[in-house]
Amino acid sequence: MPVKTLTKIAAVAATAVCAVSFSATAHAEDDYRPLENRSTGKCLAVPNSSQTAGTGLIQWECNNFSEQDWTLTGVAGGDGNRYIIRNLNSKLCIAIPNSSTTLGTQAVQWGCDSRKTEQVFIKDSWGRLRNLNSDLCLAVPNSSTANGTEIIQWTCTENFNQRWVY
């Protein structure tokens, strides 16, 4: 085959590979789903569909509204298990305010920045979401089933109130 033909074939193949790669990445980042707590069966939610940075996160009866839909976007580091978690409605990410390492601190939504470790979570095989900065897990305190219960950070355990189905 002439060199010119091989060059054209290589260019077409490279374009096809890039197109597949970009569409797969875009699809993965647009995969918004609820985060349901294994203990309570309720979903991680932004109250009243708030789009305000700093709004505290709660659990609520799962209802298929966008304030309960989240996407996990991979960030560098770890074993490919580090994510920022963005809400569909507000486009803000889960964060632990002021880089707190205090037990019981309520998780909030904040402008997304994967360089800030208070917004990076490690998702393990049990479905726990451990904050990279505090090394504490997102939890429903005392496995409360009440709508409006604050989502807090707590020492990681094997309890189901720290496990999330995505």
Image: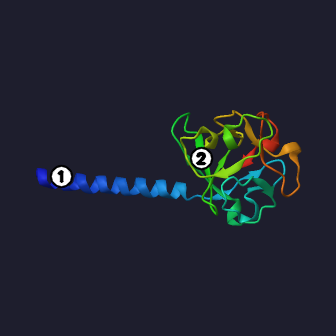
Question: Which amino acid does the dot numbered 1 rest on?
Answer: Thr
User: Residue 85, percent across and down?
Assistant: 62, 50
- Element type where label 1 sits in the image: helix
- Residue holding disc 1: 7
Q: Position of residue 99 (x, y in %)?
A: 66, 38
Mark 2 sits on what residue?
84
- Give the residue type that dot 2 points to: Ile
Q: Position of residue 75 (x, y in %)?
A: 53, 42
Give me the residue at 53% from left, 35% from top. 77
Residue 125 shows in this picture: no
Measure the alpha-carbon separation of dots 2 and 1: 40 Å
- Looking at the image, residue 135 lies above or below residue 151: above
In the picture, measured across the screen, residue 109 lies left or right of residue 143, that is: left
Across and down, in percent, residue 14 comes to: 30, 52
Residue at image location 81% in from the left, 61% down from the top: 61
Residue that appears at 47% across and 55% down: 24
Q: Residue furthest left?
A: 2
Q: Is residue 128 left or right of residue 149?
A: left
